[in-house]
Amino acid sequence: MNKLIVDKTEPVTLVGGGDLGEGDLDWALSLTKCLVAADGGADPALAQNRMPSAVIGDFDSISPQILAQIPPDRLFQVTEQDSTDFEKALRAIRAPLVVAVGFLGGRVDHQLAVLNTLVQDIGSPCVLLGAQEVVFHLPARISLPLSAGETVSLFPLRRVSAQSTGLEWPLEGLVMQPGGQIGTSNRALGPVTITTDGPGLLGLVPRHHLPALMQALL
């Protein structure tokens, strides 16, 4: 298991080497106080003149040119190959919340691995910033100030039941599970509250709700 590398009392931005939308890193850093890179995420960070306080991973993705620019005391190599760089970084961060950018888009297998890690509650709560949505692992209860007509998607990675208020298609009576009932493309009637009977349910809401989602998870 990774040792603790980053220990903060405020939210942290974690950047990966996947698709990074224009302005995503700047937006995330406007909401957090610290930047950490997962392996090859150091490349887009330095390309935007952002020096991570720590780079964590097995260093098989970071380019040699970027590696040479980072002070040695900010490099934390984790050589085991049983986990992804996203998982390695999450295990090494203690913070109230992690905002992860550059982990969605690109290779589907990488995205699936990231989503699988997200529902394992490894380390701090984490929100993934995507091109259209923010993705998060639902806690036992969450309330979000959504507007009528906005899309709310729920996708189970474990067997889970939930209850809701404010959704066009309520969740009561549904048992969601991989290969069975899912809850994508639901719609908000206004503010939404969801409670779950256990872990394993991913939530997706429009990306402009990132600040409100951060507050709800904090």
Image: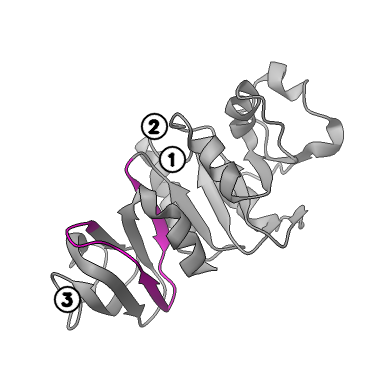
Q: CA distance from mark 3 to mark 2?
A: 33 Å
Which residue has dot 2 on it? 106
Q: Residues within 10 Å of mark 2 (few under 14, many from 20)?
A: few
In the image, farthest residue toward the left: 169
Q: Which residues are magenta?
A: 132-151
Amino acid at pointer 3: Pro
Which residue has dot 1 on it? 110
Amino acid at pointer 2: Gly
Residue 91 x %, y %: 65, 57
Q: CA distance from mark 2 to mark 1?
A: 8 Å
Q: CA distance from mark 1 to mark 3?
A: 32 Å
Residue at image location 52% in from the left, 41% down from the top: 27
Observer-nearest of 84 and 162 = 162
Which residue has dot 3 on it? 170
Q: Nearer the viewer, mark 2 or mark 1?
A: 2
Q: Secondary structure at mark 2?
A: loop
Q: Quadrant of residue 81?
A: top right
Residue 62 x %, y %: 64, 27
Whichever of labels 3 and 2 marks the residue nearer the N terminus, that label is 2
Q: Secondary structure at mark 1?
A: helix
Residue 109 x %, y %: 39, 40
Q: Secondary structure at mark 3?
A: loop
